[in-house]
Amino acid sequence: MKKSLTAVLLLIAFLLTGCSNSTGADSKAETPVNVTVNKDTLSDTLRWFNAAYAIITTRNGGDLNHIGGYETKNLLNVQMIKSGLKESWEVTDRTTADDTLNWLLEQGGHNAVLLEEYKESSLSEYTREELIEVLSDSSYTDNDRAYYLGLYDAVANYGDNAILAWDLSRAMQLSAWYYLADYYTYEEAMDKSLAIAKRLQEAYGSWDEMTDSYLYGFQYWNGDDMSDENSESYARYQIYQELVEQTDSPYSVDWNYELQKEWD
């Protein structure tokens, strides 16, 4: 069966999410509970979850009124998500799904890599003005300058949580996709999301702070410049601004909302 053009385009967009180096052996996925979620039944807790990765859901053309951005009983969606997980994350089963989340949540993900690079580059020895002066040398390209200033600013603003939001936001989205791909049950996916969401609330004080850290992380991973209007980082920043201004903004759920387990 040929894929529809829509499915192909969505898969291409899906692959923009980034990847880890996680791999794992085959294992049998548990059969998920089929739970349909729509805008009439979406609780504030679930809306908070969706808001945490609303930028990429929107970039992918997904629906913020559905867990993971897609309807659960659509076989084309399942096929697309499984293909994306394999190509972008090397996730093909429950074991590799667990391994990838472990890399993001327990092994430090890209946040740990950035912090190590910050240390090795001795960036703490400079003020921002001094770093700008060093980077003004002609041996540095514009992308180099954006890269090192991004490293510097992420740590200056958020310390050890520099780009933690980049890792945790993707971990939340992956948890939902694992459910849609039949690798996790609905309860397992939501339990993971709840734990991750609480970590985000502890690390940041607002949606703006979380998104700022997320965008630093995306710029770091993508190697572009958020101030460049032609860059993907700039496009994601614009998506956030547009979502904030919507009358039905996903960020209308209070950042400090007391998240609750509702799926026993």
Image (tube, rainbow, N blue to C red):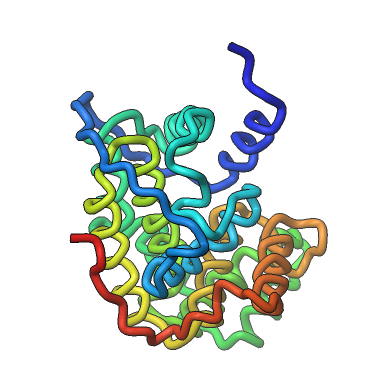
Dividing the picture into quadrants, the one containing residue 236 is bottom right
Residue at the limit of the structure toward the right, as seen here: 229
From this view, report whether residue 121 is shown above or below residue 107: below
Q: Residue at x 25, y 67 (%)?
A: 262
The single residue placed furthest to the top in the displayed view is 1
Seen in the image, is 223 located left or right of residue 24? Answer: right
Q: Position of residue 155 (x, y in %)?
A: 46, 78
**Residue found at x 43% / y 42%:** 72
Placement of the N terminus among the 4 image quadrants? top right
The answer to which of 8 and 139 lies nearer the viewer is 8
Please say whether residue 117 is visible from this viewpoint: no
Going by the image, does 175 lie left or right of 221?
left
Q: Position of residue 187 (x, y in %)?
A: 23, 53
- Using the image as rendered, state which of residue 233 and residue 63 is in the foreground: 63
Residue at image x 38%, y 58%? 172
Any part of residue 19 in sight: yes
Residue 229 locus on image (x, y percent): 81, 63
Residue at the far front in the pictured view? 40
Query: Going 49% across and 44% down the picture, which residue do you hit?
Result: 71
The answer to whether 33 is drawn above or below residue 165 in the figure is above
